[in-house]
Amino acid sequence: MKKLIITMSLILGCTPILAENIYIDGEVQSRCSIVSDTAGRYGNPSAFLLTTVPASGGQVPIIRFDYSLANAYYASISTPVSFSTSPSLSDSTVFTGAVAVVQTSSSDMSNYQSQSTTPASNTRQYALTIAGTTWFSATRVATHGGGNNTPYPSGSYRSTIVASCIAQ
């Protein structure tokens, strides 16, 4: 009996143990997309002011969010607090403006603006509670020199809006 146990242990001890990793793969496609529907443009109604307001020669940018899942995403829109491209500026620039819902694909989305939050001073966040499409405007006014009304130097000016779909 003792020899049988020893023989069995040697046989089992020499038998290779096989193991295999079995993978489970998958991909997640975002169900929220962002489109720049209308490009923004600064108008220059006075020497110290740049604005996207149409009455002053500007164009308000319109951002479209398309999303196919309700209660899955936040629309987050951060407006600029500085220029990403500009000539050298001799004074400070103060940015003001607002983000607003301008159109929705369903009347059930009518409370998006009143239910929005401001997690940062230049960011507005919207809970996308109903699947569909929502258009947002982002007006900006850039005043050079604060209250000193310092004229802008000639040149090209650009600022950037950051629009994101954030998973809830």
Image (cartoon, rainbow, N blue to C red):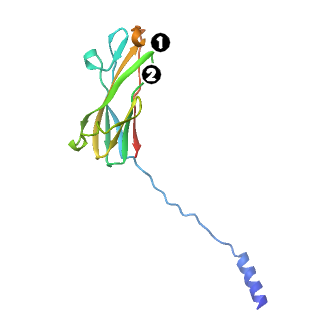
Q: Residue at x 44, y 52 (%)?
A: 27
Residue 35 vertical placement versus 59 (above, below): below
Percent across and percent down for residue 43 are: 32, 16
Residue 161 vertical placement versus 93 (above, below): below
Q: Residue 54 carries which label?
A: none
Q: Residue 82 carries which label?
A: 2
Q: Which mark is residue 89?
A: 1
Crowding at dot 1, Cα within 10 Å, few <14 / some 14-19 / many 20+, comes out as: few
Percent across and percent down for residue 138 are: 33, 28
Q: Which residue reaches farthest left?
A: 107
- Looking at the image, can residue 39 be seen? no
- Looking at the image, can residue 75 be seen? yes
Whether pointer 2 and pointer 1 mark residues with C-beta atoms closer than 8 Å, the reply is no
Residue 85 vertical placement versus 9 (above, below): above
Which of pointers 2 and 1 lies earlier in the amino acid sequence? Answer: 2
Tell me if 3 is positioned left or right of 17 in this view: right
Amino acid type shown at disc 2: Ser
The quarter of the picture where residue 154 lies is top left
